[in-house]
Amino acid sequence: MTINLPEARRWPGSEWIKNHPAALERIYAVSVKAFTRVYPAMKKIAPQSSERVMVFVEAVGKGYVWNCQMCGQCILHSTGMTCPMNCPKNLRNGPCGGVRANGHCEVIPERMCVWVQAWERSQAMAVYGHKIVTLQPPVNRALKNTSSWINMVEGTDQITPPGWAAASPTGNEGLEHR
Ligand code: SF4
């Protein structure tokens, strides 16, 4: 029996949400603008609490929709609103060469390849869909369990290993919205 598990964990309604990437990218664009404006005040008033609140919000909110692994460098808008950290190989650039003919994962055959889903969803995204071809640098494991939103505004998620800076930023073009 084949179980069509699109991603590692599916909460009720989360697949329906992810399958509306055009709406998600619009929400993302508005949220980036809003958070970029609000964060400086949050940081000034209560920097540690701001981090704790955002970590909680992301862990719960993005955990529910995307099974977020709290990598701290969110690139959802560059990956078809599909979390690449749900790939069993944690590939930030995919798919690998092992995608099955039916679009399923070679590691977990019951599951759709995260990157096949990412590509398909990106095709419905008018604003950020083209970012699916952005070359992503290696994920910075030091940022795990930190707030990707704060890292985005602070620019922490833009720091790349030597040799990568000139090739490509993280693809987290949220800063463009400032
Ligand atoms: S890319 Fe990182 S921060 Fe974004 S949903 Fe996936 S694990 Fe969470």
Image: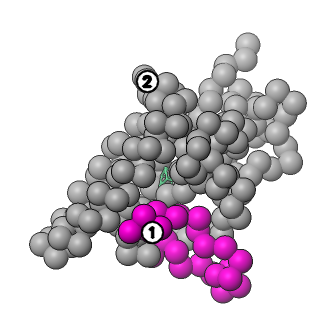
Type of amino acid at the residue the image marks with label 2: Gly
**Can residue 47 be seen at all in this image of the molecule?**
no
Viewed as shown, does residue 118 lie left or right of 68?
A: right
As drawn, 142 above or below 132: below
Question: Within the image, what quadrant is residue 165 found in?
Answer: bottom right
Type of amino acid at the residue the image marks with label 1: Leu
Question: Image point 36% across, 51% down: which residue?
Answer: 30
As drawn, 77 above or below 175: above
Q: Which residue is mark 1?
A: 175
Query: Nearer the N terminus, badge 1 or badge 2?
Result: 2
* Front residue of 97 and 76: 76
Q: Which residue is mark 2?
A: 13
Magenta residues, as a range?
Answer: 156-178
Residue 51: image x %, image y %?
27, 65
Q: Magenta span has 161?
A: yes
Q: Magenta span has 18?
A: no
Residue 86: image x %, image y %?
59, 45
